[in-house]
Every structure is written in structure tokens, then in C-alpha cells.
Image: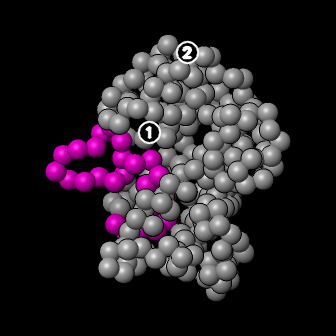
Amino acid sequence: MEFCPHCGKSLEAVKSAAFCPFCGGAVAMETAEPEPQDVQDFLKKLEDVTDPRKKHQQLLAAEERFPNSLAIAEALLFLGRLYERGGKNVDFSVIKCYLWMIFLKPEEIPAQRLDALRQEFFNHPQLEKCLSLCPDQGSFLKQYLLRLAKEFITLFLRGDSRYMRRFFGFGLDNQAPKYLAAPVAKMMHAIRKEETLTSEQRDLLSKALYQAFSDDMRGATSHLDTKLQESGITP
């Protein structure tokens, strides 16, 4: 399934469009061949499956049946290890977008696990499978990182009362650009300092996170820009 590299919304219904109908951004990526009708029907039914274990099992079976389906490979990629959830100890790392936590709270992650999460961003079998099936690997990688960044902001920043203040239990969404600027700036600073990544990888991560913030905040980036400038970082 394809997503706009700017706003992250699905372009499944407008594969031939030159511009995203949601945000107006140019869509320059080369589109893949349309998925077979059987795959489209399967993915439609999969939307009703809420149990991650069942979803994982069905996706694995579908991948065997349709080994060249980018949409199925992509669904497995973003499912992450969610099917492993359960037990007494809550492990948020089963959520795929948790990868970004290495730049926000690295001190809370064991060193060995930290290294594994770093590697997973760009070196994961399921990501490699998707890239092998994608006609435009560069665009896919950018969309993949953008989607992960958007999901991280929604789940781990907007969903955390330590960042999004509450008033009688209600979130102050109009203050999100101000409240979330500091943690995102901290993450971007950590990305720039991460020596285990190549300069290209650091650039991809920084741009994806900044774009995700901008899209989520509807372009209200002034607070983030100020925080970045204070750290000597150019957005």
C-alpha cells in the first residue's frame, strides 16, 4: 500500500495521481503494479481482524500464497511484534514505532537491546523484503520512516501525559506544538549525534521526524524551530 511522503495518508485509491489529494504534495515515486484482486480482498477483510496474533497468522499464510505482494509484506512490516504482546510485563517495544524511543529515552533501554533497535530501523528482514518488491526503494524508505514517526508522535508523545498536559483529564491539543517541541527537538539532537548511523541515515531520520511533527501540528513548527536553533540544528 502506498502513502503520501508528505502527509502519510494512503494513496491506494489514487495510484496515478501526481499530487496528493489530501495535502497537495507532489507524489514523485514510481508506483508499483496494482495488487491482484485476491490480495485486495484479503487486505480488506484483514481490517476487521483486531487480534494481532490472528492478524499475524493470516498475513504469514497470505505471504506464502502471494510471495511477491508488496502490500502484504508491508502489512507484516508495520505489524511489528505486536502479536507477541501479553504477559505480566508490558513491553512497548513490540509496537513497531517504538524504535524512535532510542532517541528519546535511551537511558531506559538496556544497551544490548538499544543496539538491536538501532539496527532495526534500516536493517530488518521484513524491511528488506519490502524494498526488494518496491520499484522506488528511496521513496518507500522515506514513507516507512515518516509513517513510523507519525505513529510514534500519536502513541508515545500525544498519548503520554508527561508531554501532553491534561486539564481535568482533557488534553490541550491546541498546545501540542508547544508541549511536544521539546521532546522532538531532543530526539532530533540525539539523531544528529548518533555515530552508529551513516550521515544519510541520520538525514533521513531527521527529515522524517520533522515532517511528521509538521504534518501532525498542521505546520505549526515555530516552537520546534526555536528549540532546534537553540541546539544549533537546522530543520
Residue furthest left as drawn:
88
The total of numbered circles placed on residues is 2
Q: Secondary structure at mark 2?
A: helix
Question: Is the residue 53 above or below the residue 138 in the image?
Answer: above
- Looking at the rendered image, the quarter that the N terminus falls into is top right
Q: Residues within 10 Å of mark 2 (few under 14, many from 20)?
A: few
Q: CA distance from mark 2 to mark 1?
A: 21 Å
Colour option used: one colour
Q: Could you tell me which residue is drawn at 38 percent across and 32 percent down?
A: 49
Q: Which residue is mark 1?
A: 79
Return the x and y of residue 25 as percentages of the image width and height. 78, 53
Q: Secondary structure at mark 1?
A: helix
Q: Could you tell me which residue is drawn at 73 percent across and 36 percent down?
A: 14
Q: Main secondary structure of the magenta part?
A: helix
Q: Which residue is mark 2?
A: 38
132 and 10: which one is in front? 10
Question: Is the residue 69 above or below the residue 99 in the image?
Answer: above
Amino acid identity at mark 2: Asp
208 and 115: which one is in front? 208
Say whether residue 84 is magenta.
yes
Return the x and y of residue 179 as percentages of the image width and height. 50, 79
- Looking at the rendered image, the quarter that the C terminus falls into is bottom right
Amino acid identity at mark 1: Leu
Q: Which residues are magenta?
A: 82-108
221 and 123: which one is in front? 221
Tell me if residue 206 can be seen: no
Residue 181 relative to residue 85: left or right: right
Residue 213 relative to residue 163: left or right: right
Residue depth check, mark 2 versus mark 1: number of the one nearer the observer = 2
